[in-house]
Image (tube, rainbow, N blue to C red):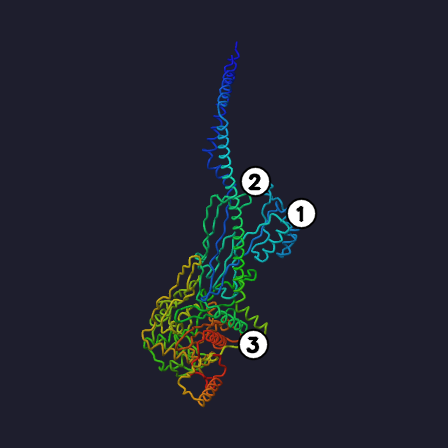
Amino acid sequence: MLTSNDSIRVRMRLVAVFFVFSFCALFYRLYIVQIQRHDELYQKARNQYTAKKTEAGKRGEIFDCNGNLLVGNIPCDDISVDPWIVGDSVTCRKVAAMFAKYLKLDFQEVYGKLMRKTRKVKGKDGKEIVRRNRYAVIAREVSIDVSTKLKRIIKANEFAGIFFREKYARYYPKKNLLSNVLGFTNVNHGEVIAVLGVEKFFNKQMSSSKSVLRFERARDGRPLIYGERESIKARNGLNVYLTISEPLQSILEEELDKMVAEWKPAAAYAILADPKTGNILAMAQRPSFNPNDRRSMDPKAWRNRICADYFEPGSTMKPIAISGAIDYGVVTPDTKFNCEKGRWKYGGKILRDAHPMEILTVGQILAKSSNIGTAKIALLMGEKRLYRTLRKFGFGAYTGIPLKPETRGALRPVDRWDTLSITRFPIGQGVGTSPLQMVRAYCALADHGRLRKLRLVDRIEDNQTGLIIKNPIQKPLQVFHNPATWDKIIDMMCLVTEAGGTARRVAIEGYEIAGKTGTSQKFINGAYSHKKYIASFIGFMPAHDPELVLLVAADEPHGSIYGGRVAGPTFRNIALRSLRYLNIKPNPALMKEGKKR
Amino acid sequence: MNIQTRNIRQGRRTNRRTAEGLSIGTKLFVVLNVAIALSAVFLIANYRISLNQNISGIEAQSARYQQKIHELNREIETLQVRREKLCAWTHIRDRVAQLGLDLRMPDPFQVQRLVVNFEDQPVSSGNAVDNKLAMRQDWSAAGNVNQ
């Protein structure tokens, strides 16, 4: 029989055992929570009180040589809503009316988005599950003027569930200006994709990194004072400074537009360069596009024809070939050739001149653009010397411009030349050059035979650190062996724009202009077309101290086919306005008496 | 026999005896010490709370200012881009046409520099008048002289 003491002892033991088990269970639980699932639970807790804020840095901008903005970033907002928070149908109506008014959206569409409180999704087992709809985009890239107005109205009316996500949109403040060269970017799922032009070539340098800030937050979302913080700073993209001068570019594009309006060519291009540095000061093509207006953009206008396309240059090739002949000592400016009254048979084919001519000096051959005379000079030169001359002037090679794709043109090696090649290549038939290659060759011709790489980018700048990466002007290659060659060829090229030359329309009072007209038949389906031509004019000024090299070309002009008529006046207008802008004074000795001061 | 009950009673008796043995001064001293310690803790805690409150207020204010600066920076960026848009030649050309401004091409000789050396001229009343006349002629001969 149990006594009262025994009963107390049993009860005490039972209680002790209970406590021991309870403590054991507690310790086991503690072990699980604190040691075994520590990381998982710690992360879970952290996620509840830790906020993460990401911000993208700014993509690098593009400027002209004087710091005028050509491509920039404009601040804007993406507006989204959480339909679950926005509220009932009455509030949704008010919110939808607000968005429709300020964002010029369709009321019903916005209202529909706000009232779509649930959405159906497929579960793991393939069955449809209904879930809360917590996200709907109302508008993208809303200007900050509008978004500021909206924020004020939202605050005043105490609307909830509307979110503004700050971002930058790529913006082209000069619209069509230089658009083919600058290129453009697209945005795909928040990622910037460079499509073409400088934007694509320097995409790596101009791309920015994202900033990430993790902080422990209070209930209202503000960072806790003593909370932990982790931050990765955003890096802005590098800014690119081009050699382009915006005022000159504007002049060039305006005059090019006038030419396109008058002659309605299928395409047109113009390039203005500084021969002493190889800097491209302006370059444009038509058709072009406005990168701000994606709806009106025609993919046919995207291609940068200036460096991606090549054409047969025609007579603009003659000064190159003749300068080679003079440099090798094969001819002098006074050497005479019989131009066969405009009809000459060689290699079983007839070569014609535009006008019948007889005995001409080399200077006259160039001034009157005789095909027969030039072909005879090339025959005296020989194939190898002609090929070497063309190669030295950079034909068949890249120009060094940072644009892709770039063509190397078409210049066959000597062993693949046929009988006619030597008579056709010096008159610009059978060889393909890009407009840029032509400008590069004329830059060499203008700068005493010094061939340089063309420069489009002057420097790249990091606006956060101030670091500047300069694109150096590279040492030129010397084309001419004989220093006297330059003077001779320049004097002959000046005759082109004087009385008796093919481009009298190009002459500008007070300035000597050395240049050459080009009227080339287009090679279509294995034959030279008698309807489709490329009319061009290329030259430099002032002839004996060149500051500018300019090419103007019209592809398939209507109304006239001649370079002197179609491209000449445009060349003159661009040259005159550019000379005035650069304050390059005319030579008083070349002006009429009445106008001299 | 309940041992625990007896022990408790014994303990109470002992405590009572000890408390009875303490003087009032000692009791007051102990109470005072405890009060001082408690109020020190209270003061420190309160000071800390008010300090935290201040910091929190300043942080909130700083966040507001930062937000304001951020908004202003965005506005400046927008204005810079807008300025560039207005500086575009196409825009200027349209405005020139709209306002009917009669602009003309610059003349390379419209700006001329005249160097007038007065020191070379002899100073006399008659010559001074001649010099002035000569200068006027130079200016009129130069035409549209700006400088």
Mark in the foreground, 3 or 1: 3
* Distance between mark 1 and mark 2 Cα atoms: 29 Å
With B50 as the anchor, is A371 left or right in this view? left
Q: Nearer the viewer, residue A307 or A56?
A: A56
Q: Position of residue A215 (x, y in %)?
A: 49, 45
Q: Quadrant of residue A467?
A: bottom left
Q: Quadrant of residue A488?
A: bottom left
- What kind of residue is marked 3? Asp
Whether labels 3 and 1 share one chain: no
Check residue B102 in the rendering and tell me which mark sits there, or answer none.
Answer: 3
With B54 as the anchor, is A446 left or right in this view? left
**Does A196 appear above or below A586?**
above
Q: Which residue is the site of mark 1? A: A89
Whether labels 3 and 2 share one chain: no
Q: Seen from this angle, which residue lies furthest bottom?
A: B126
Q: Which residue is the site of mark 2? A: A123
Return the chain for callout 3: B
Q: Position of residue B100 (x, y in %)?
A: 59, 74
Q: Residues within 10 Å of mark 1 (few under 14, many from 20)?
A: few
